[in-house]
Image: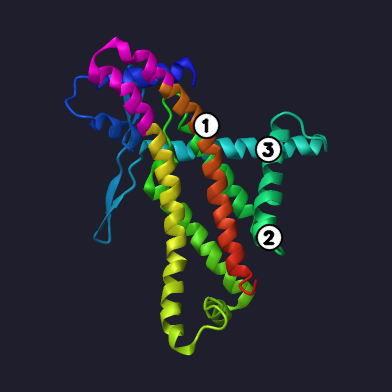
Amino acid sequence: MNLDTVKTAVDTLHSAGEKEDTSWILEHVLDGNYLDFTPFGKIYLPQIHFNLFGIDVDLSLTRHVIFMWLALVILVVLFIKVGKSYRNSLVPKGISNLVEVLILFVKDEIAKPTIGKGHEKFLPYLLTVFFFILTCNFLGLVPYGSTATSNISVTATLAIISFIVIQIGGMMKNGVFGYFKGLIPHGVPAWLIPIMFVVEILGLFTKPFALAIRLFANMTAGHIVILALLGLIFILKTVVVIPVSVAFALFIYLLEILVALIQAYIFTMLSSLFIGMAVHQDH
């Protein structure tokens, strides 16, 4: 955790120090229609509302949307640069070497073991999810940054996309009828089949639900803990707790760097595992 990040967090806490409750913690973690540059002020984002066939449509920009766009720009620029480096030399150097290591990690340690034969078809999606989540997670750790993956709408959308890929993968391999038939374990008594079918269908939806909640909860919890620890300084209104609060906040921040990596890995690994289970139902 660099000094700029500490200063940013402390300035944010100081500006909220006169509040009687701890709602400022949620204000910092949740989405908003502004970019917070405390103590320099806030930049409010355009709010776009219109009516379409009697439906109120809200396309207002929020800070999580801005940081998702920023993650997109970073990844596009990064992979264009990496692609050009391979045209000039077959031996990767610098950032290209790091990207290749991560790509091979996703391919050899996630996709291949969990999906097996035919994993190449799903590798582009898994790589996209891995790098997008990883970039969003790290953007939330920079000064004045915001973690888009701490938004349940973002994680739910990623989980829904994984759900669609899982179902399409299973149906392409086994056929529509064969896929749903394969949900029922072999050797189940006939009278249990209707019950098991309902249970398995519910299981299809609990998998993406678990993906969404796991990523959302883990990326939100760390930021809340850091702010709560630093907030003790202003809540207790004493300098005595400063060394302890800052030390623990630094520790949690370093832990958050590890969590950012782990959560990108877990989401990708579980998505790959569920794809493998759908594709190879007979294994």
Q: Residue at x 60, y 40 (%)?
A: 76
Q: Main secondary structure of the magenta part?
A: helix
Q: Residue at x 49, y 62 (%)?
A: 163
Mark 1 vs mark 2: which is more N-terminal?
Answer: 2
Pointer 2: what residue? 119
Q: Can you give x and y, in whole percent of width and height, for residue 214 in the image? A: 44, 49
For the residues labelled 1 and 2, the Cα–Cα distance comes to 29 Å
Q: Is 103 placed left or right of 1 in the picture?
A: right
Q: Can you give x and y, in whole percent of width and height, for residue 92 in the image? A: 77, 34
Q: Can you give x and y, in whole percent of width and height, for residue 237 in the image? A: 23, 14
For the residues labelled 3 and 1, the Cα–Cα distance comes to 18 Å
Q: Which residues are magenta?
A: 224-247
Instruction: Using the image as rendered, state which of residue 6 and residue 238 is in the foreground.
Output: 238
Toward the bottom, the furthest residue is 190
Marks 2 and 3: in contact by CB < 8 Å? no
Mark 2 surroundings within 10 Å by alpha-carbon count, few (fewer than 14), some (14 through 19), many (20 or more): many
Mark 3 vs mark 2: which is more N-terminal?
Answer: 3
What element does badge 1 sit on? helix
| Image vertical order of residue 20 relative to residue 72, above or below | above
Q: Which mark is residue 99?
A: 3
What element does badge 3 sit on? helix
Q: Nearer the viewer, mark 3 or mark 1?
A: 1
Q: Is 158 placed left or right of 237 in the picture?
A: right
Instruction: Using the image as rendered, state which of residue 274 and residue 61 is in the foreground.
Output: 274
Asked whether residue 142 appears in the rendered view, the answer is no
Marks 1 and 3: in contact by CB < 8 Å? no
Q: Can you give x and y, in whole percent of width and height, for residue 103 in the image? A: 68, 44
Q: Which mark is residue 257?
A: 1
The quarter of the rendered structure image containing the C terminus is bottom right
Q: Which mark is residue 203?
A: none
Mark 1 surroundings within 10 Å by alpha-carbon count, few (fewer than 14), some (14 through 19), many (20 or more): some
Q: Is 239 placed left or right of 96 in the picture?
A: left
